[in-house]
Image: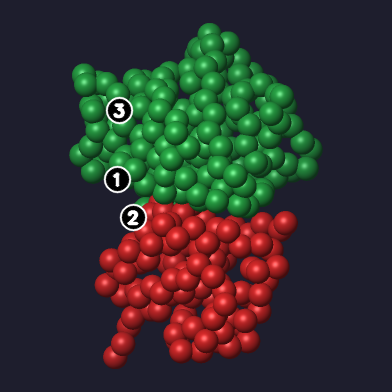
Amino acid sequence: MNSRTNILVLNRNESILEVILRLINNHENWYGVGQSELDNLAHLMNKGHFELVLIGSGFSPAEEQEIVKTSNELNPGIKIVHHWGGGSGLLTNEILAALEGVKGGNYEISY
Amino acid sequence: MTNTVLHKSETRGHANHGWLDSHHTFSFANYYNPERMHFGVLRVLNDDIVAEARGFGTHPHDNMEIISIPLEGDLEHKDSMGNTTVIKEGDIQVMSAGTGIYHSEYNKNKDQAVKFLQIWVFPNKKNVTPRYDQITLNVKDRHNKLQQILSPNADDQGVWIYQDAWFHMGNFDKGVTATYDVKRKEMEFTPLF
């Protein structure tokens, strides 16, 4: 039985993306794949079997909407949350809260 | 209608790493309590004690308003924007992490621990150009009264952040009371620490 959780991390800041992926992949049950651009998001989503998408910094509101739309279309039921703070402080909490479906576990803002 | 949510000090999350003794009001790092994730836009309120000459090595942040308030001792700050400074009691440090910054915070003192509050507020605007600021306030101006240390307005007292939030500090003698006027009637909450 595979208990690994696949997580797609999107962040335009490549050095922060690298740090987040390292932190995620240090967790024995999590596997993170990252991308700083959205060109092949659909392809990645099709083959990645992701349970969770973490949206980091650098994307416009329209791009974030596109991420949500594409993710939901190709993987209905996938969890999509913002990653805030760009480091280790909130990352584990955000992932756990998202996977558990904690209401109000994350904070969303409107532009 | 007033609604009070009381978080007693001893119910906070606690992590003692030797060099860092930290109490977390909200879930942070390895402390996870789904009942305590954030309070409105207030996401992190860490009560930190850092041992002599130790500290947080260089690490990144993005999209967060980060405020540090030294209570005792001196904290040495370096960041990827080229700032190298020391903050001490009476100072307020603020960073808008925006599109991304790297920074380190070390206890400048070789002979005493540094105590400080580390506060993170969700920004109301994402992906801003990173910025750093620090100011020095007269701690006497908060004796038995509330001193504003942060607001959303660059021309108001204290530092400013990208959020409709105000912080005040006060050092009160026993029995002294003060009234806090909510800044905006529609504000949902007023945390006290």
Q: Could you tell me if the residues under marks 2 and 1 are in contact, i.e. CB atoms within 8 Å?
A: yes
Report the residue at 57% width, 77% height from top: A39
Q: Residue B107 got which mark?
A: 3
Subunit of label 1: B
Residue B152 visible: yes
Q: Nearer the viewer, mark 2 or mark 3?
A: 3
Q: Do labels 2 and 3 share a chain?
A: yes
Q: What residue type is labelled 2?
A: Asn
User: Residue A4 placed where, x, y %?
Assistant: 33, 81
Neighbour tally class for label 1: few under 14, some 14-19, many 20 plus, Cα within 10 Å:
some
> Circle 2 — which element?
loop
Which chain is depicted green?
Answer: B
> Circle 1 — which element?
strand
Which residue does the numbered mark 1 point to in the structure image? B15
Q: What residue type is labelled 1?
A: Ala
Residue B34 visible: no
User: Residue B44 placed where, x, y %?
Assistant: 48, 45
Report the residue at 64% width, 68% height from top: A64
Q: Which amino acid does label 3 sit on?
A: Asn
> Circle 3 — which element?
strand
> In which quadrant of the rendered view does residue A57 lie?
bottom right
Report the residue at 60% width, 15% height from top: B145
Residue nearest the observer in this picture, A2 or A53? A53
Q: In this view, does A38 lie to the left or right of B104?
A: right
User: Residue B182 placed where, x, y %?
Assistant: 72, 32
The hue in which chain A appears in the rendered picture of the protein: red
